Amino acid sequence: MLTERQRLILALVVREYVESTQPVGSKRLADAYSLSFSPATVRNDMAVLTDAGYLQQPHTSAGRIPTEEGYRYFVSQLMGQVSLPAQVERTIAHQFYQARHDYDQWMRLAASILARQVQAASLVTSLHPTHSRLKHLELIATRGRQVLMVLVLEGGEVRQQVLALNEPVPQERLSQVANWLN
C-alpha cells in the first residue's frame, strides 16, 4: 500500500517522464513542483517505489522512469476518471456497432477513434500473446506526411507499416516518440 506522498511522487514521475522522456530526478521534482518536502525525502520514496516495482533506474546516476506496473497503477489509481460527452460516446458506439462483423474495420476504427480522442498517433494490433510484446519500434519519416513504422516483437517477428499522418512530422519528433514508446 502506497502512502499519499508516494502516490503523489509516482504521479509526478509519470507525468514528467511522459512530457520529457528523460529519467526524473528527486531534485527536479522537488524544484519543479515546489514540494513541501526535501529532495532527500523524494529520493527515499523513489527508492521505495523502485523496490515495489513501480519505478526503475536506467543506470546508477540517472533519475527514475516508470515501469509497466507504474504506468498501470497511474492509469488505474491516480489518473482519475475521464469521460466523453454523451453524444461522442453514442457516435463511437454506433460506429463500432456498424463494424461489428468486420474485424479489420473494427481495428482500423479503434485506432482512428483513439488517435482522434487523444490527438496523437495510435496503433492497434492483434497478435499472438507469445509474440505480442514490443521489443523495439522505429518511426522513419519518408516523404511528406508518410512515416514508415517498423515494429520488432519479442518473438523475433518484424512488422512494417506505412502511416499517413495529417501533417508532416520532423524526424527528430518521430525519434522522440519512438524513444518514449521503447
Image: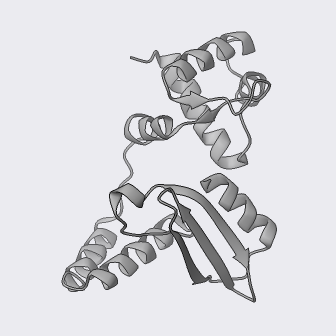
Residue at horizontal 67 percent and vertical 80 percent from the top: 147
Q: Is residue 7 left or right of residue 89?
A: right
User: Residue 120 location in percent, x, y?
Assistant: 57, 67
Q: Is residue 129 left or right of residue 140?
A: left
Observer-nearest residue: 86 or 75?
A: 75
Image quarter for residue 33? top right
User: Residue 42 location in percent, x, y?
Assistant: 66, 16
Residue at horizontal 68 percent and vertical 20 percent from the top: 35
Q: Can residue 79 be seen in this view?
A: no
Most distant residue in the front direction: 156
Count of picture labels:
0
Observer-nearest residue: 18 or 62?
A: 62
Q: How is the image coloured?
A: one colour
Image quarter for residue 66? top right
User: Residue 61 location in percent, x, y?
Assistant: 80, 25
Up-down: is 66 above or below 20?
above
User: Residue 65 location in percent, x, y?
Assistant: 64, 35
Q: Is residue 171 visible?
A: yes
Quadrant position of the N terminus in the picture: top left
Image quarter for residue 26? top right
Residue at horizontal 46 percent and vertical 15 percent from the top: 3
Residue at horizontal 68 percent and vertical 70 percent from the top: 139
